[in-house]
Image: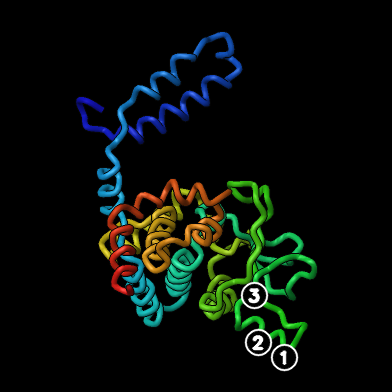
Amino acid sequence: INNRGLLAYSQRSHLGALYAAVRTFPQLSGHQFDWFPSLLAAMPDEDESQKIERKARKTVLYDELDKVVGKLAELAAKASGVRKAVLCRDRMLVQWLRTLPWRQRNIRECRLGSPSDANVFKAELPRLVHVATPTWVKERLRLNPGETFWQFHFRPHETKTGSAVRRILPRRLIPLLEEYLANYRPQLFRDSDSGTLFLNDKGTPFSPSQIRQVTSAVTLRYCARRVTPHIFRDIFAYKWLDEHPEDYLTLSKILWHRNIQTALRIYGRNYDESNGAARIDEWLSGK
């Protein structure tokens, strides 16, 4: 940190993982590691403004991601075979992450199939289970109470926070999803179908490094920034709060946080004195 200019937060993360490993490793049970917490606590922290500036250098504006989706669609229109399938997969992946900013684990492990065991499926809405319905869904249900809809459902053991998540798939994703499932995903898997929604170039589920590599490569090429699945979450959060400055509760639900405090802790620093001054100015202007 002092001599090489490394970031304290990243070193703290690495040392914290090492501490968690050695203190539970059976062959090291006789050793004392009580000095670890004091070492971690003594490490200097970044200034808050430096954190914001560093994160800003890694992100792009939400609307700039349209360029990536548009360019991939343009290239796919000129391609054929497996190359076309890969481009259409990448296009859907980017569009998916800018619409549903899931953690990369859920993107990688998302399974297709029946409602009883899949994460993404098309079925009637469950009875006696709360699933909020947008206006377009309510209109269809008035015409046909038995209408089926694309939905997603993750059980408690499938989410980081241990909470179940169930929702109707956003309408903007449905045409792209159905096209991908009918025409392009079958070209990606080889000997057998793993059942996951997204498949890598070899037809198997993505690894964490592979999915980061795909999103980083296409965003670097078309909007000059390496955007990982985690940074997609930040970009979405900044866009949401820019248009809904105080709606941290909705954001916490979109990002599947355990409670609103997590969203406030991570993104609340973007709501500072300048936001308060702007609100006061608007309030006084209306007097």
Secondary structure at numbered mark 1: helix
Q: Amino acid at mark 2?
A: Glu
Q: Amino acid at mark 1?
A: Leu
Q: Which residue is mark 1?
A: 143
Q: Quadrant of residue 285?
A: bottom left
Label 2 to label 3, Cα distance in Å?
10 Å
Q: Which residue is mark 3?
A: 133
CB within 8 Å, label 2 to label 1:
yes
Compared to 2, does 214 lie above or below? below
- Is 64 on the left or on the right of 141, as rendered? left
Colour logic: rainbow
Q: Residue at x 71, y 66 (%)?
A: 130
Q: Which residue is mark 2?
A: 139
The spot of residue 157 in percent (x, y) is 67, 47
**For mark 3, does the 10 Å Cα neighbourhood hold few (<14), some (14 to 19), or many (20 or more) residues?**
few
- Is 164 on the left or on the right of 218, as rendered? right
Q: Quadrant of the N terminus?
A: top left
Label 1 to label 3, Cα distance in Å?
15 Å
Q: How many marks?
A: 3
Q: Quadrant of the C terminus?
A: bottom left
Q: Is residue 183 visible?
A: no
| Residue with the most extreme top position | 30
**For mark 2, does the 10 Å Cα neighbourhood hold few (<14), some (14 to 19), or many (20 or more) residues?**
few
Q: Residue at x 36, y 49 (%)?
A: 269
Q: Is residue 69 visible?
A: yes
Compared to 245, does 286 lie above or below? below
The spot of residue 55 in percent (x, y) is 31, 50
